[in-house]
Image (cartoon, rainbow, N blue to C red):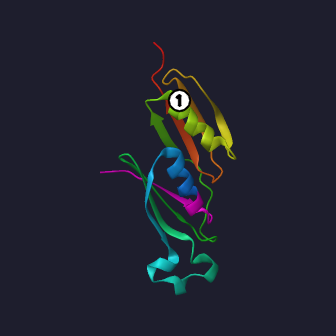
Amino acid sequence: MKLISYLTFDGRCREAFEFYAKVLDGKIVAMITHAETGYADQVPADWRDKIINAHLTIGDAELMGADAPPQYFQEKAGVSVSVQLDSESDAKRIFDAFAEGGTVTLPYGPTFWAKGFGMVKDKFGTPWMVGGGAPAS
């Protein structure tokens, strides 16, 4: 079994996934619009370029997502995507990238389980928990 986080967006899925690919050093393996499905006539014209399925790989990890039509979109709540790295400097870089234009909910700093850990909701509304490095003994 494999668990994969699937994120929904308010029309900014393409922008979010391009950002995530850059920040997380990942590769977009799918970015399918409604127009490309053969069902373009079943969505409003201004929705045809929106993403029905995005798929990003980061090493052996995966992240998927889509744009949710306005009547179905809900803000993300009660869940976070957790990114844990061996490198504390990589974790801090990722946290800072997510924090730019976002909202820090727990400032990045040392904890008893990691050299650095923080929580942030990025500019797309995705909540992240980012940590890195084993704590000092």
Q: Position of residue 20 (x, y in %)?
A: 53, 51
Label 1 neighbourhood size at 10 Å, few (<14), some (14-19), many (20+)?
some
Single out the residue that lies furthest toward the bottom: 41
Secondary structure at numbered mark 1: helix
Question: In the rendered view, would you say 87 is above or below 48?
Answer: above
The residue range painted magenta reads 1-15
| Residue 92 falls inside the magenta stretch | no
Residue 15 in percent (x, y) is at 59, 59
Q: Which residue appears at 64% of the width and 70% of the height? A: 70
In magenta stretch: residue 8: yes
Q: Nearer the viewer, residue 93 or 42?
A: 93
Residue at left offset 47%, top offset 26%: 133
Quarter of the image with the C terminus is: top left
Q: Residue at x 57, y 36 (%)?
A: 93
Q: Which residue is mark 1?
A: 89
Q: Is residue 34 above or below residue 64?
A: below
Rendered position, 16 above or below 82: below
Which residue occupies the extreme left position in the image?
1
Q: Residue furthest top?
A: 137
Q: Position of residue 51 (x, y in %)?
A: 53, 69
Quadrant for residue 106, please give it: top right
Q: What amino acid does circle 1 point to?
A: Ser
The image shows a total of numbered marks equal to: 1
